[in-house]
Image (cartoon, rainbow, N blue to C red):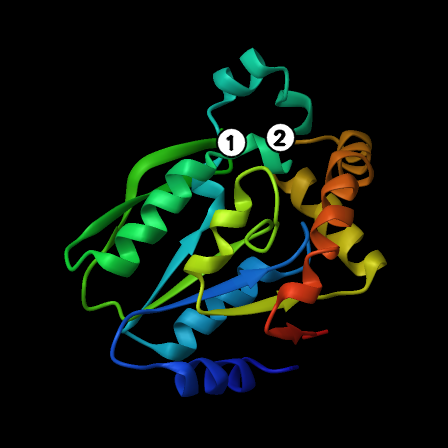
Amino acid sequence: MRSIDEIAAVVTGARGDSRLVVGIVGPPGSGKSTTADRLVERLGDEAVLLPMDGYHLPQARLVELGRRDRMGAADTFDVDALVATLTALRFSGGLVLAPGFDREIEEAIPDAIAIAPEKRVLVVEGNYLLHDAQGWERVAPLIDLSFFVAVDHDIRLRRLIERHVRFGKTPDAAAAWATGPDEANARLIDGTAVRADHEIRLG
């Protein structure tokens, strides 16, 4: 798929009477966040976005666990909390609160997203939604329709470095993080592409 209209058409065709949970998956820098934003905008008032970033473990907890230097890896997220949110969204008829994320301080913001019952399409975006280990195997069964965002490696790397610089890293530190922890995560995430229902290549 190469256009938001194509993606939106598939989502619209999959809708039924109950809430539809759509997963947008891809490695760091693939453009999944932008794709998810544009999809929600295209779908209109009945759609809402839930970014996976809100489920990052707190910085203090990552330091305690010895994982701060690889923040963004599969074991640096609160999978239990994400599963609880998705379960509530699928089976609760009421308002569901979910965390947001502040990239400036790299911390989750509790209850930053309020998802009302009338939001019938939930677009979840994140790296590990199709991962099948470390507790993530509980996530995919809660997603009705999944899309994997694929992009050329060099384009993805350039985007990542630019993003890291934008949020405060020096160019050298940005390149080191993009080719180190980010690249290791990307290899794992690319291996989950076969589990997606559809592939997206927007550019």
- Residue at the image position 63 percent from the left and 21 percent from the top: 67
Camera-nearest label, 2 or 1: 2
- Residue at the image position 54 percent from the left and 48 percent from the top: 137
Q: Secondary structure at mark 2?
A: loop
Do residues under tags 2 and 1 come within 8 Å of each other at their CB atoms?
yes
- Residue at the image position 51 percent from the left and 38 percent from the top: 103
Q: Nearer the viewer, residue 54 or 17?
A: 17
- Res 71 label: 2
Q: What x and y, as percent, mark residue 158?
A: 78, 52
- Residue 66 sits in quarter: top right
Q: Residues within 10 Å of mark 2 (few under 14, many from 20)?
A: many
Instruction: Give the mark, 2 or 1, whose residue is nearer the N terminus.
Output: 2
Write down the residue under mark 1: 106
Residue type for callout 1: Glu
Q: What x and y, as percent, mark residue 197?
A: 59, 73
- Res 53 label: none
Which residue of the protein is positioned furthest toward the left in this rendering?
94
Residue type for callout 2: Met
